[in-house]
Image (spheres, rainbow, N blue to C red):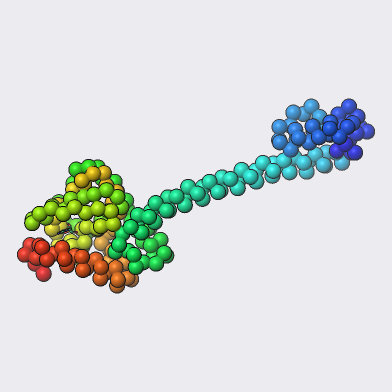
Amino acid sequence: MHFLEAKAQPDKFGTIPDSMWWAIVTLTTVGYGDVVPVTVWGRLVASLTMISGLIMLALPVGIIATAFAEDIHRREFVVTWGMLARVPILSSLSASEIADLMRYLRSQTVQQDALIMRRGEEGDCIYLIASGEVMVETADGEVALGPGDFFGEIAVLHNTRRVATVRALRQTKLLILDAADLNALMERNPEVRERIESIARERTEAHWGQIGD
Ligand code: CMP
């Protein structure tokens, strides 16, 4: 710009530092307008400088914002992944199967003492405990379940009513899987079916008389 404009405006572009002042004002998109090129070539260079200034600012902002968004997203993902990774019945699932399952799970936070299900009511979903603790109140006694455990499978597998009342012992985060999605999951993964069925078998032995075979 010094070479292009020095002759036309010696007071503004007469020295390289003067021209640098114009460049900084233009590149940062501040554009005070105190120094303006007047020659055709000067204006051409100024146009390119202005566009470069925009790119210089827009590019890092875009990169930083994208990285930020990705990081936030990844953290959410890790939380969900961590929740599922802690559920032993799902340990035979591959990464893509867990990712697939994540889409079908609903999450629900229940407060301390909240009633999650009542004995005798109909049930069409199972619950996985992500965090917290619940108390299963069966006809024979009480059993506490914690992170990684699941409940509500008996009604879904046997097509019966709930055999126990379940209450939250403290604030509990639950992942809910509907019966249809659970059946699809078990169909795709015999290992998951086997694990759920064997735990359900152990539990139903205690209530055999109540739910029949
Ligand atoms: P479901 O009958 O659908 O609803 C109540 C749930 O309590 C039941 O499924 C089981 O998941 C759970 N449950 C019943 N009995 C026991 C037990 N003895 N130990 C742990 N959990 C149980």
Up-down relation of residue 147 to residue 13 (above or below): below
Q: What residue occupies the far left of the structure in this picture? A: 209
The total of numbered circles placed on residues is: 0
Q: Residue at left 47%, top 50%?
A: 73
Corner quadrant of residue 4: top right
Q: Residue at left 39%, top 51%?
A: 79
Left/right of residue 93 with respect to residue 167 in the rendered view: right
Q: Quadrant of the C terminus?
A: bottom left
Left/right of residue 188 with respect to residue 18 in the rendered view: left
Left/right of residue 109 with respect to residue 55 in the rendered view: left
Up-down relation of residue 93 to residue 165 (above or below): below
Residue 98 drawn at (x, y percent): 38, 62
Residue 160 drawn at (x, y percent): 14, 62
Up-down relation of residue 207 to residue 25 (above or below): below
Residue 57 drawn at (x, y percent): 67, 41
Q: Quadrant of ligand 1?
A: bottom left
Left/right of residue 5 with respect to residue 95 in the rendered view: right
Q: Residue at left 29%, top 46%?
A: 109
Q: What residue occupies the far right of the structure in this picture? A: 7
Residue 148 drawn at (x, y percent): 28, 57
Q: Is residue 181 visible to us here?
A: no
